[in-house]
């Protein structure tokens, strides 16, 4: 079960990685009592028929069964959004990629907490696979951005304890 907005971000980003995306972008916007997340990838995409099915809790992509046993991330997201009067938008094109945009009204009592963005981003950056992850954060009039590629260029191997410690400090100092 998903307990935080960061859980949804992790699940959707993992879907992008499993869909063969080489570039994944996460935009996290926190403004005027609305949290909006847009995740875009250049993975395998989906056709119209699949887009209609992905919110069905009884549907899972047969290509993923070897990766994960459950495929409930998007149905859980849709349920959470429905409970908190948020919005979800899915746009995808076969062999071109997918964009998932969702929002929550932070004044609604059923909106989940954000969660730990630092640990979420640290985990996503270290997911196995050859992909670049670009993260942009907006809070009112402030903006910050970074990418996995930039961090690897600056730190080298991002899987050493020293690099992970520096990366965690960097995220702590720069996440809005």
Image (cartoon, rainbow, N blue to C red):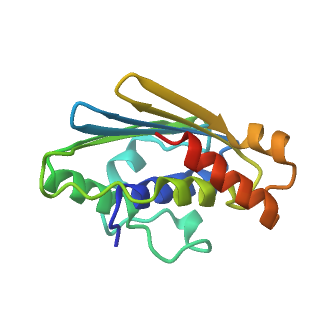
Q: Nearer the viewer, residue 156 or 102?
A: 156
Q: How many marks?
A: 0
Q: Is residue 118 left or right of residue 161?
A: left
In the image, residue 88 above or below residue 4 = above
Residue in the image at 39% along x and 62% along y: 73
Q: Is residue 165 left or right of residue 153?
A: left
x, y (%) of residue 137? 48, 35
Q: Quadrant of residue 160?
A: bottom right
Left or right: 128 as drawn, with respect to 43: right
Q: Is residue 70 visible?
A: yes
Who is closer to the viewer here, 10 or 57? 10
Which one is in front, 25 or 70?
25
Residue 153 against residue 64 in the figure, above or below: above
User: Residue pushed farthest right?
Assistant: 156
Residue 34 in the image, given as x and y percentages of width and height: 25, 37
Can you give x and y, in whole percent of width and height, for residue 149 in the image? 76, 40
> Which residue corresponds to the image point at 39% horizontal and 22% vertical from the top-left?
141
Residue 94 is at least partly visible in this image: no
- Which residue is outermost to the top? 141
Name the residue at 54% across, 31% down: 144
Where residue 19 appears, as percent x and y from the top left, is: 61, 52
Q: Is residue 4 above or below residue 171?
A: below
Figure quadrant of the N terminus: bottom left
Q: Residue at x 58, y 32 (%)?
A: 145
């Amino acid at each position: 079960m998903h307990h935080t907005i960061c859980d949804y971000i992790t699940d959707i980003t993992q879907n992008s990685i499993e869909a063969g995306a080489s570039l994944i972008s996460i935009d996290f916007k926190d403004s005027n009592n609305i949290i909006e997340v847009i995740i875009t990838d250049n993975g395998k995409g989906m056709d119209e028929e699949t887009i209609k099915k992905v919110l069905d809790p009884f549907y899972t992509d047969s290509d993923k069964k070897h990766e994960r046993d459950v495929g409930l991330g998007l149905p859980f997201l849709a349920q959470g959004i429905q409970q908190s009067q948020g919005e979800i938008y899915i746009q995808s094109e076969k062999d071109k990629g997918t964009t998932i945009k969702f929002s929550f009204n932070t004044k609604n009592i059923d909106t989940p907490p954000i969660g730990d963005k630092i640990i979420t981003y640290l985990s996503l950056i270290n997911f196995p696979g050859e992909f670049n992850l670009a993260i942009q954060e907006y809070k009112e009039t402030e903006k910050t951005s970074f990418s996995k590629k930039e961090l690897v260029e600056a730190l080298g191997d991002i899987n050493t304890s020293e690099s992970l410690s520096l990366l965690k400090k960097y995220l702590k100092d720069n996440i809005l």
